[in-house]
Amino acid sequence: MRFIKLVIISIFFLFLSSIEIKAQRFKNVKDKSYYSDDVILGKKTLKYAQDTVVIKEKEHNELNEVVIKSQVSLLKYGANGNIDVNVNGTVLATSSSVNELLGRVPNVVVADGEISVVGKGEAIIYLNGVLINYERFAAIPVSQIQKIEVISNPSARYDAEGKAVINIITKKNIESGVLVTVNQHVTVSKFGGTIYNTLVDFNYSKGKFSFVTNYGLQLGRNRELLYTTRTRPDPDDFMKSELTTDWKRRFNNYSNFGFGLQYSFSPSNYISLAYSGNVNDLGGITESRNSITNNSGNSFYATDVDRNDVLLNQFINLNYNWTTAKGSTLFIGSQFSNYNQTIRDFIDENSLIEETDSERFLKNNVRSRINIIAIQADYSKKINEKTKLEIGAKFSHATINSGTDFLISDDEINFELDDELSSDFEYNEKIVAAYFNYIGTWSEKFNFSLGVRGEKTSYDLFTNANGTQKFDKSYGNFFPNALLNFNLSDDWKAHFSYVSRITRPRYQALNPYVIYQDPFTTIEGNPNLLPEKTHAFEIGTMYKKFDFKVGYTYKIDPISAAALRGDTPNSYILRALNLEKGHTFFTSLSRSFNVKWWNSVNTASITWQKSVDNYYEFAFSPVEPQIYLYTNNTFTIPKLFKLQLLAWYLSDRSYGLGSENGRSTVTLGIERNFFKDALKLNFTANDIFHKFMVSGDYNVGQTQIYYHRTYSTDYFKLIATYSFGDSKKTTYKKSEVEQSENNRAR
């Protein structure tokens, strides 16, 4: 609680302080964060960039060159409501994974496998402006990331999937010649264990030819703990279940790899071929303990799962990019994605019912294969200095084949197939999309963007779970969008935006097969799920270093997870379903400043979310808003070290169906370079107070459910980075094409 108060006080001070802290500047020279110009002062030339000021005297008696350096801003606000977050050289770059990195980005929340933007909802991920899948995203080396773009109002150029876009920009200063970078991470967590992560990047370029390759290997252990209670207070139907699930994961082979070839016909015209993949060989033990009390007495169940899960993902990209001297561009890209997963889990299940012991053995064998082909073409035509037209098209085809064999034995020798928990699943999906976007400028103070995207989806589904079932469906949607920008003055800008989006169900959420979790809990898909559609409005203004936004989102058929009563009194089914509608209101205020030794980013927002439904017997609670606070600070002591402090806080919230408890985290880092920056050492303490725990409660009919999930976020990490080679600056265009279907493969 003391930490929360300190964060609130700090951010309040930073926002409302009337003291404008500035770096030492020369008189009559304005701060230019986005531009680089020359200013003539009599016989002197003043050249300034984002972080360097150089003064040279033209006369013979000139003084020696004077260089004044300041830190690069952590964050930049766009007039359209988007933000750019620098990663390189900040505490964000010490993250073990891109998933962890995004959890440290302002206005981005990562929890339970979902990446969302505050006030908007779940985001889709792009790499250098091109959509990527979740597995590819997870395999990106953090060391190669330059910055993160949070796009809260995506135009028709972006896929309609998701409610916001997060664009990951990799470093462009890949060198000609040879450059090798080696990263070694050692992460120690009292709760989770120790993890060793080794990353190697190799870059070679000569003339018009470039070659890049990388390999990363992660070994060690981590942990996740979930405590759940289910209570029916009705005396005639009383039941209380206390379930503890402990995932003790072992990384047998957690690796990613890839290479890229590029031939440049000219600096802006190139063809590239890329291959990448990742292997996740996951072992360890999952321990489940369930104590049940009801009107019949007490019972206890213990389940131990010996994990043997292997996932192999592979991707091939072939791309061509062409740019004219007048600024028009053509991009043609293709990709093939392949996902192969096998699960060989052995389950030892013990029970104690009315002083009677019993034991049985289970095998859960799962095989799954997903193939996705995607082709896209994007063309941008600069009509004149004030007008630009963007058009494009996409086609994707996804096929899925999976099967589950669930076997039961009383003696660990003779296993029999359980038909209710075994099934096969086949799925085929095609999506055709086209868009256009018109960008115009009416005057120096007003510009706009108008566009529309059309998508046609068709799929067919077969499963023998719960009897033979076949489904097929075809639907089309149009997604208009509009953006208006007002440049009222050099210090004051404003914008208005409207975007429409869609969230399609993930493939496994459509699969009605049964996943065994414990004797009373199963996970089942829902082939009747509908896509979720959203309409989002936003008004924002920028005044000097302040950024203010207010927005509203209307959801139709929102997809929600629920725990439903099963066939037996004590059983529950975890399943995704559609509610009727949803409403989200949000407002946010941000301020940043940058001085020679101190760089700071600060954000505060309030989100109000409500779900509405008349289809199910859910109990709705009063809605309460959620407060989000964020601060990121870097302190630089020249020639010694760099100290970094990051903290964020999410308050309690109630959204009608249930409520979530607050959580927070504090991260400290210290960094120093050696041998002319060839060697970099970084020590990071993450989630110092171990307050990143997701908990809350909700009701299912007459059942009250409470959950509390603990992650391995409290750790100490040592990072050593060494770079060597003989190189000169060049550029490698790492463009890729993928479709949003890849994200749904999770």
Image (cartoon, rainbow, N blue to C red):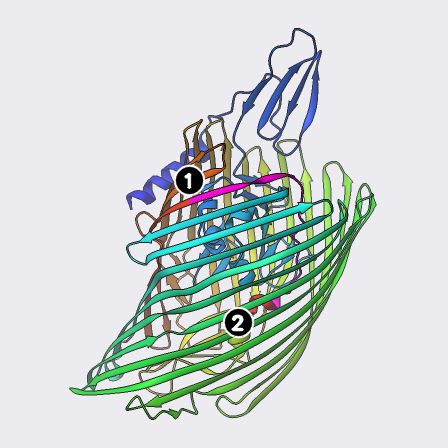
Above or below — where is 746 with respect to 10?
below
Q: Is 358 placed left or right of 666 in the picture? A: left
Q: Is residue 598 visible?
A: yes
SS for tag 1? strand
Asked whether disc 1 touches disc 2, contact meaning CB atoms under 8 Å apart, the reply is no
Please rate how many residues cluster around mark 2, counting C-alpha atoms within 10 Å: few if below 14, some from 14 to 19, many from 20: some
- The image position of residue 258, as x and y in percent, is 58, 59
Camera-near label (1 vs 2) is: 1
Q: Is residue 260 magenta?
A: no
SS for tag 2? loop
Above or below — where is 199 with respect to 307?
above
Amino acid tagged 2: Glu
- The image position of residue 226, as x and y in percent, is 32, 66
- The image position of residue 88, as x and y in percent, is 52, 42
Quarter of the image for residue 261 reads bottom right
Give, as a single range, the part of the protein colored magenta.
720-741
- Quick one: 521 or 184, which is closer to the camera? 184
Q: Residue at x 32, y 42 (%)?
A: 5
Please tell me the numbered disc located at residue 325.
none
Residue bearing the label numbered 1: 681
Please rate how many residues cluster around mark 1, counting C-alpha atoms within 10 Å: few if below 14, some from 14 to 19, many from 20: some
Quarter of the image for residue 616 reads bottom left
Above or below — where is 481 with respect to 491?
below
Q: Residue at x 46, y 50 (%)?
A: 606
Q: Is residue 175 visible?
A: no
Residue bearing the label numbered 2: 580
Q: Residue furthest left?
A: 355
Q: Is 118 placed left or right of 77 in the picture? A: left
Label 1 and label 2: CA atoms lie apart by 52 Å
Mark before the other along the chain sequence, 1 or 2: 2
- The image position of residue 503, as x and y in percent, is 58, 67
Above or below — where is 582 with respect to 637?
below
